[in-house]
Image (tube, coloured by chain):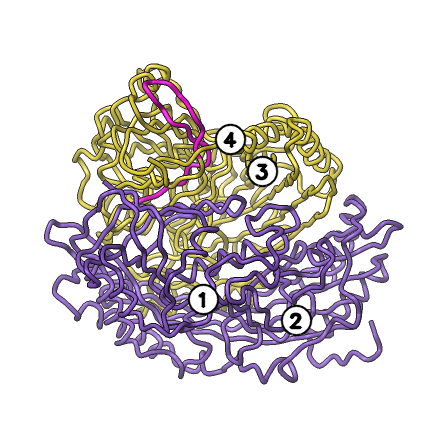
Amino acid sequence: MSATVVVTTDLQSLAADIVSKALKAGATDAEVTIREGDEFSTTIRMGEVETLKESGSRGMGLRVLIATPNGHRVASTSSSDFTPEGIDHLVNGALALARVTSEDPFAGLADTGEFGKIGGENGADLELYHEDVYSLPTADRIEYARRAEAAALAADTRITNSDGGSFDASTGRKVFANSRGFIGEYRASSCSIYAVPIALGKSGEMQRDYWYTYARSLQKLDTPESVGAEAARRTLRRLDARRVKTQQAPLVFAPEIARSLIGSIFDAASGDSIYRGASFLAGKLGEKIAASSVTVIDDHTIVGGFGTSPFDGEGLPSRRTVVVERGVLTNYLLNTYTGRKLGMKSTGNASRGLAGNPGIGSGNLFLVAGSTPPQEILGSVQSGLYVTELMGQGVNMVTGDYSRGASGLWIENGELTFPVQEITIAGNLQHIFQNITAIGNDLVFRGSVASPTLRIDGMTIAGE
Amino acid sequence: MTLPPSPAAAGTQHRKYFFDKFGITERLLERCLGEALSAGGDYADLYFESLASTAIGVDESLVKSASQGVSAGCGIRVVSGERTGYAYTDDLSADRLLRAARTAALIASGPAKQPVQGFTETKTPSLYPAPAVDLDSDLSARLDLVMRADRAARAYDPRITQVRAGYHEELRRILIAASDGTFASDTQPLARLNVFVLARDADRTARGTSGGGGRVEIDFFQIEKTPEHFAREAARQAILQLGAVAAPAGEMEVVLGPGWPGVLLHEAVGHGLEADFNRRKTSAFAGLIGRPVASSKVTVVDNGTMPGRRGSLNVDDEGSATQETVLIENGILKGYLSDKLSARLMDMPYTGNGRRESYQQIPMPRMTNTYMLAGDDAPEDILRSVRRGLYAVNFGGGSVDITSGKFVFSASEAYLIEDGKITAPVRDATLIGNGPEALKHVSMVGNDLELDEGVGTCGKDGQSVPVGVGMPTVKLDRMTVGGTGR
């Protein structure tokens, strides 16, 4: 370890110690991740406590690299056994595995000058951790869940059943150290309230929907009552749904649905897919891939954000990357490995589990809001579908082919009319992004990926 | 309280692992259960789990990744009426176990209860091998598998430009002790080989995937289903997709091929028949027992007792032997899949379907291997009967809204049927239907039942478990196909 590293906690010294042990055992480089987490959850159903869960766990992962004449051999191990024997097993196992992997000329840690972190000591200035998520006594936590469900049940006589209300809280601590002198740590907290009511329609059909509030601090949660009321509203509007005829029609994606399209842009621009040619965006850097009104940003630095961290999965400082600017693909999303494969630098998008090579992950990923109120977007549609739910995974990143189950509300002369279900919507992402014809002014982060309301033209609805 | 001599030598061996390695004793199990019921409650159980996994991957003909992981822990559950208290620990010392038991006990509030005196060890079959401990022993054999897959895929066609192959195996040991006297242990292997390829020609790039395995050891991949088998299959699909046309859009006749298309059953009916949803009356199938939910040609079972299958278990995660359960018989809904809690609260049979992803999770009713029994029709007659429709033989995943009954599953290999003949391959398309209605449109059932290759993972409430599916060739008179074409 570099002499300049200041180790300030037990877990940091443990991580540093494992890195040293790996180097002593024959690794050229090593990376260690340690994670600790606690969770509390309770669910209420029909006013009664259904589950109460409280626990914690921890784990550690080691990745070793052995330099060879033509690159590095790489392997990793993970364990929940923190005893000295457990740590020895972790280290020896990783080195034994590394001996059977191939020399990869592109493998290796980032250059020493690239490591770093933002947000002050242990990322404290990023406000990711709030002790208050655990401040409530159990009875009060149960009460949050109960109030959310009760508000949903009380909203309308057609709400006859419930999949429950819940309150969850968790805290996590992550430590990362490597043999180039990087050591970093941060903690994060979160809490949430859900309500999942069930409504009964005229013909005896049931519909379920949900709503939630999610925050890093208890104080930032919406009230349980507002969660329950919104969940009820969303469930009731699905009742007595019909199918529609197969046709091409404009679609308006509600914000919570539109965000999955933003996720698809990210996935398609991820270095891993790009260097393999496994994405319809491969080779499209600098080209216009979306409507001119579309700008997509991946920002890991927003204070208190759900996708914020002081450093990425390889110890590179968090940053903000413009993925699409006025319709032009301006950056691929890269970690060190995929950057090297493409002759580029990492964009600080390394993600990491306990074991395995770093992947590519997004931070706070969003499509920049436009200026049109969502009501106006709906108002612009003569006949089309307001999409409020998508089902299934039918997105092929290689070809861009997109086909998913959907439900929503039919738009007629700019007004929402009857609910629609058991249909699919299909197109190709290459055309879908180009055919974004309106962008709402309603961007709200309810998680780490966010989008305003979007209107998309030219997709096919398959139904009757 | 003493354990009777085990009827199965294998059971003793599984149990011994926890006793030896973590210092668990019968006395400690008894104390933990006593602590768990210290505030009352109807039932308590302890679920010990130790998991070792190995993964190795070839990518661009290089072995770019190799990893191993170990974890262990214990989950403690207390059930009081419809309430469940749960706590877990990854520290198996007596102190931590007792503390977790006290946390779980908070769900109840009454006088202490006593666990049943004396454990009865569940008699378990031997549906799969119980491999020796050491996974490190033969890395080179695992390496050989992925390298062979890489070579075979590349050799299939010069248009194959990218190959990734991965081998993943795990060994899960479990021990379950419950206040009702249940005592069970098991060692559960699970292995899987996956191949992903890209094919490219002048105009297009396309993907192909394949994979399989089960509760098997490495020799399965050397003898029964070789890396070449999976590699050629992935390559075949990718080459095929280079020439695919737009999938049709709208309602039409659909023929599903045998095997993995059985994911239809998993989504359309399987989840909706899990007892927890029916106890809460949140499933579209609630209250339909004894009623027709499919054409009379349809019989669907869930069977956890098939040797070596990915969804099979000697014991479920609540300590009961698994079984074959008839869900739909000649179109009539016969029963649900239950865990202990729902069986007791619904006063129905416990079918041995209590499963959980890990010691950190509360068990719930889950499927094992779910399939439709063979019918009388020859597959070629089924295809010949279709004037215009879709023949779908391979699928990606699916999902279901169990309350409305709407389900989707995504075809990754499908063809147009025109005048009884298979014609052009089509691009990926999602199929959508309504669970309690879809199987009423089954008009022909093939005589060619197949089970899938062993790739299924089912997600429910954030918990993933391995499952199997199967089906003969089946014709549905109508189903909605989500393409873009005519």
Chain letter behind tag 1:
A
Image mark for residue A293:
1
- Nearer the observer: mark 4 or 2; the answer is 4
Secondary structure state at the residue bearing disc 1: loop
Badge 1 amino acid? Ser
What segment carries the magenta color?
A: B406-426
Please name the residue shown 62% across and 64% down the image. Answer: A349
- Asked if residue B61 can be seen in this view, the reply is yes
Mark 4: amino acid = Gly
Q: Which chain is purple?
A: A
- Residue under the image location 36 percent in, 34 percent down: B302
Q: Among the chains, which one is yellow?
A: B
Q: What residue is pinned by disc 2? A: A175
Could you tell which of marks 2 and 1 lies nearer the N-terminus? 2
Residue ID at (43%, 49%): B459
Please tell me the numbered disc located at residue B192: 3
Mark 4 nearby-residue class (10 Å; few <14, some 14–19, many ≥20): some
The answer to whether residue A191 is left or right of residue B278 is right
Q: Which mark is residue B243?
A: 4
